Image (cartoon, rainbow, N blue to C red):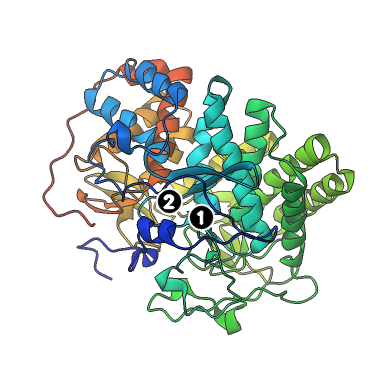
Amino acid sequence: MSNNAPTQPTEKLAPVTRRELLRSSLALGAVASLGTYTAAAQPDGPALRERPALKDRRFTSPAVESAIIAVAKQIDDPELALIFSNCLPNTLDTTVTPGTFEGKPDTFVITGDIDAMWLRDSSAQVYPYLQFCRADRKLATLIEGVIHRQARCILLDPYANAFLPSPASKPLSWSTTDDTTMKPGVGERKWEIDSLCYTIRLAHGYWKATGNTAPFDAQWCEAMRTVVQTFRVQQRKDGPGPYHFQRTANNPTDTMMLSGYGSPGKPNGLIHSGFRPSDDACLLPFFIPANLFAVASLRQLAELASAACHDTTLAQSAHGLADEVSAAIAKNGIIDSPESGRIWAYEVDGFGGRNLMDDANAPGLLSLAYLNCVDPSDRDLYQRTRAFALSTANPYFFQGTAGEGIGGPHIGLGYIWPMSIIQRAFSATSDAEISEALRTLRNCTAGTHFMHESFWKDDPAKYTRTWFAWANTLFGELIVTLAKSRPALLRQSFAPPQRAQGAASR
């Protein structure tokens, strides 16, 4: 691929419009069905130069709006304040469709310019709003609807990463010929450990933020039992299990080798993952950041199962699996790097093979701290691993005149993801490092005042995805966090944004 022009992610080919999705006939029925909406379809996507007009916003939270005003007043740099004010509410403004299903809240969340609901993205997009739920009951109900919807998605297919509004919805164009077991209502079926982890993280965070156990009904508990069972099957102690996936594609990261079962791994207690959170295929089957995420999520599930489901069997099963995977990571996932010392590997195969890199998507090595996957006893291990990820020893760490950060194979060499810069700021301990991250983030929007998926290291005007809600809301969360923990950092003035030449990727 060329490093002189922006590329498009595979999933952007011929996207289905939101209007087509919501106009599809709606199916009701079994517990595993995705259900329907009582809400009306919203206008097509915004141009995202600034926030949509009030009448065009999908959901407005008074608590979030108050936070925007309060935090923006703490920011001395007008450009940074404007970007924050646009980004924090972007998920609510543009991507959520609240409704009801079987008398309970039901919320469908698109990624932005891709009109489908990813379990990972939808969880990450609404997670920053949990802190406002106690002050805004309607917001809490909206997020409860996400939790209900995700439970139905998991029961439909625990191996799928993306879902459609209903079983009758028009399929995503790029997945129609995939060689896998597709079901109506599934958008894409790339098995990623983190998809299931994110649903637990959201549920646990919601419970801690609100104290409300209403989302954790019999259906949700059954979905969680399915999660644990799926993880156990994908330890592949007794064969490869039922999941396989192949796609005819020019990009080899869009498919899996060996009849769709992926690269072989020696059974050792780790969980196999077909794909990474970038939706790129794993090179080696044991993706260590996702296994660490699974450990943290299973411990959260054990707590929830006891307190909300009153299911001691599920709690014990989740806790036991977390212990097993944790021990397997300690034995197989930590390696000695010639340049960095003892660190977590990105991927291993159990036969001695290892992949030393990091990717901008979360979970990755850098984002382990943000996702609370780092045990206090592993702080030194994390700091060494973090240093590796943010160095030229990582083949996907890029430096240029527009900034430095981590990218990945999903877009290509030389493209930095703002998400990695945000994660760097979340995990930094020095004011100087956080300030530099803010400076880069403030200057990488190419005048759009929104985050993007990626930008060329020497020219922010060469970027991918105008409308990427996960990165937008994550940036908003960072600024809210800094306003509470390090408010002095927001009182700085930053250099004007760079005005590099080049056309944006649309």
Q: Judge from the rendering whether residue 193 lies leftward or rightward of residue 326; answer left or right.
A: left
* Residue 385 percent coordinates (x, y): 54, 46
Tell me the quarter of the picture where residue 46 sits. top left
Tell me the quarter of the picture where residue 437 sits. top left
Name which residue type carries label 2: Thr
Which residue is at a point 43% across and 46% down the rendered structure image? Answer: 40
Q: Which mark is residue 111?
A: 2
Instruction: Label 2, secondary structure: give it.
Output: loop
Which residue is at a point 30% across and 57% down the rendered structure image? Answer: 414
Mark 2 Cα within 10 Å, few/some/many (few <14, many 20+)? many
Instruction: Label 1, secondary structure: give it.
Output: strand
Q: Judge from the rendering whether residue 317 lies leftward or rightward of residue 77; answer left or right.
A: right
* Residue 188 percent coordinates (x, y): 51, 66
Q: Tell me the CA gap for discs 1 and 2.
A: 7 Å
46 or 342: which is nearer to us?
46
Q: Judge from the rendering whether residue 367 lies leftward or rightward of residue 148; answer left or right.
A: left
Which residue is at a point 52% across and 25% down the rendered structure image? Answer: 132
449 or 459: which is nearer to us?
449
Name which residue type carries label 1: Trp
- Residues tagged 1 and 2 counted as in contact (Cβ below 8 A): yes
Q: Which residue is mark 1?
A: 118
Q: Judge from the rendering whether residue 6 lies leftward or rightward of residue 156; answer left or right.
A: left
Image quadrant in which the N terminus is located = bottom left
Q: Which mark is residue 474?
A: none
* Residue 206 percent coordinates (x, y): 63, 33
Which residue is at a point 38% across and 54% down the rendered structure image? Answer: 407
Image quadrant in which the C terminus is located = bottom left
